[in-house]
Amino acid sequence: MFHKEGAKIILIATFSFTVLLLGSPYVIANPWILKSVQLVLLFLLIMVLQFFRNPKRPLEVNDYQIVAPVDGKVVVIEEVYEAEYFKDKRLQVSIFMSPINVHVTRYCTSGKVKYSKYHPGKYLVAWDPKSSTENERTSVVIENRIFGEILYRQIAGALAKRIVNYAEEGMTVRQGADAGFIKFGSRVDIYLPLGTEVNVKLGQKAVGNQTIIAVKNHG
């Protein structure tokens, strides 16, 4: 299944592939060159399709857990000063997405959206620490009944040129539901209260809606 944000691009890519595939034999006489061109076209179409894939991952909502909002690699776990919303120290966990990862963003927790803001900016590589504050990005705060306020930030990378964010202030959202999309390579930062028990390690592969980022004990 594919994400709705890719519908237009997939349609254009499929149409272009079909036209070029059918037309190439009329302009390329050499069979080896023809076959190579056709394979390249097929590869490009597959890359577009895999980028916009949206695998179904059923999730049992658990307010005592923060789940990974995206697929990728955990590249940051550190205490930082969050200057945009909290204006105090938070525990930051960041997940970097390469172009081959699933780029759907899902809500990492349930609750009410208290803050949602888009920031235009640069397109530094997503693993650059400055990308959190200088790149194009959206910041969303969800108030959860167990963890309190959790901020997640979608960050555009060197290739990503569009961030889609579905969260609007006042909405009540469900953990695991579709929260948006980032096109072509990016990163997501999660800001947790200090003292939160983190359940992942640096370098670990994260899977959206499956990997548990943080937990809080009952009681």
Image (tube, helix red, strand yellow):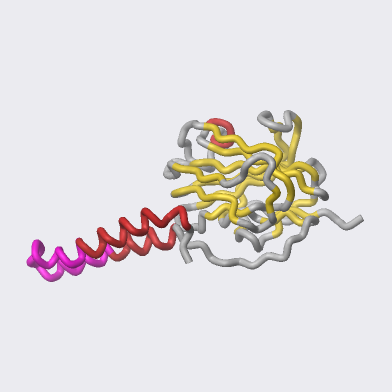
Count of labels in the image: 0
- Characterize the magenta stretch by its predominant secondary structure: helix
Q: Is residue 208 left or right of residue 79?
A: left
Q: Position of residue 114 (x, y in %)?
A: 71, 39
In the image, what residue occupies the spot 71% across and 59% down?
212
Q: Position of residue 89 (x, y in %)?
A: 75, 33
Query: In what quadrant of the picture does the C terminus appear?
Result: bottom right
Residue sitting farthest toward the right: 219
Vertical placement of residue 120 versus 64, above or below? above
Residue 16 in view here: yes
Residue 200 in view here: no
Q: Quadrant of residue 81?
A: top right
Q: Is residue 1 left or right of residue 56?
A: left
Q: Position of residue 34 (x, y in %)?
A: 15, 66
Q: Is residue 139 left or right of residue 9?
A: right
Q: Position of residue 144 (x, y in %)?
A: 77, 48
Vertical placement of residue 14 versus 115, above or below? below
- Frontmost residue, 65 versus 34: 65
Q: Is residue 24 magenta?
A: yes
- Frontmost residue, 160 versus 75: 160
Residue sitting farthest toward the front: 170
Instruction: Give the magenta range.
Output: 20-41
In the image, what residue occupies the spot 52% across and 50% down?
181
Q: Is residue 165 magenta?
A: no
